[in-house]
Image: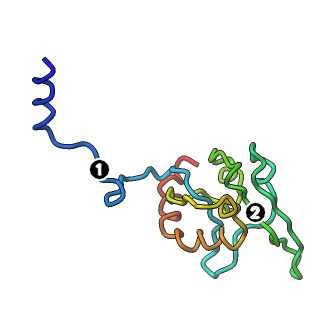
Amino acid sequence: KGMFLTLKYFFKPKVTINYPYEKGSLSPRFRGEHALRRYPNGEERCIACKLCEAVCPAQAITIEAEPRDDGSRRTTRYDIDMTKCIYCGFCQEACPVDAIVEGPNFEFATETREELYYDKDKLLANGDRWETEIARNLAADAKWR
């Protein structure tokens, strides 16, 4: 009986992928590495409302803000402690301007713990790097938001 089962599956097509060289498809709702987005003119989207900081159940987000000359507010500090983050997506849901998002990147292993403390520059760099894919995923999911 065991030999029959082995032969049966031996001639069927493989269902596994060779991971480092082949990548499976991801859902548009996949929650990976965090990123801060910019408007097309290059200005950062975050309006320093601090809703993401308030809604974070792990208290992984720290925001400091200052008013600008035109009366609007922008962040001077936006930090995420990725060692605390539980990838729940509440920050992304709470953001009124789609500034903070969880992008498609899931390969961000590090050698030191300090590299998992993301500051504003790192988050903006992630947003710049993944913007086309993030925008496509948000557009695909817009009907259900």
Q: Is residue 56 left or right of residue 89?
A: right
Q: Residue at x 75, y 47 (%)?
A: 56
Q: Is residue 124 left or right of residue 134?
A: right
Q: Are marks 1 and 2 in contact (CB under 8 Å)?
A: no
Local packing at callout 1 (Cα closer than 10 Å; few below 14, some 14-19, many 20+) is: few
Residue 51 has which mark?
Answer: none
Extreme front residue here? 111
Q: Kindly identify the residue that appears in the image at 36 percent across and 58 percent down.
A: 20
Q: Amino acid at mark 1?
A: Ile
Write the residue at 61% across / 73% down.
Answer: 125
Secondary structure at badge 1 equals loop
Relative to the observer, which residue lies in front, 62 or 5?
5
Mark 1 or mark 2, earlier in chain: 1
Q: What colour scheme governs how the chains and residues are painted in the rendered image of this protein?
A: rainbow
**Label 2 is placed on what type of residue?**
Asp
The image's mark for residue 17 is 1
Residue that numbered label 2 is attached to: 79
Quarter location, residue 40: bottom right
Picture quarter with the N terminus: top left
Tell me residue 54's x, y (percent): 81, 49
Instruction: Locate residue 3 relative to residue 143 in the image: left or right.
Output: left
Residue 17 lies, in percent from the top left, at 29, 50
Q: Residue at x 28, y 45 (%)?
A: 16
How many numbered circles are shown?
2
Q: Position of residue 121 (x, y in %)?
A: 69, 74
Residue sitting nearer the eye, 37 or 34: 34
User: Are there few (<14), some (14-19), or many (20+) residues within 10 Å of tag 2?
Assistant: some
Give the spatial CA distance, label 1 vs label 2. 36 Å
Specify whether 143 is left or right of 45.
Answer: left
Q: Secondary structure at mark 2?
A: strand
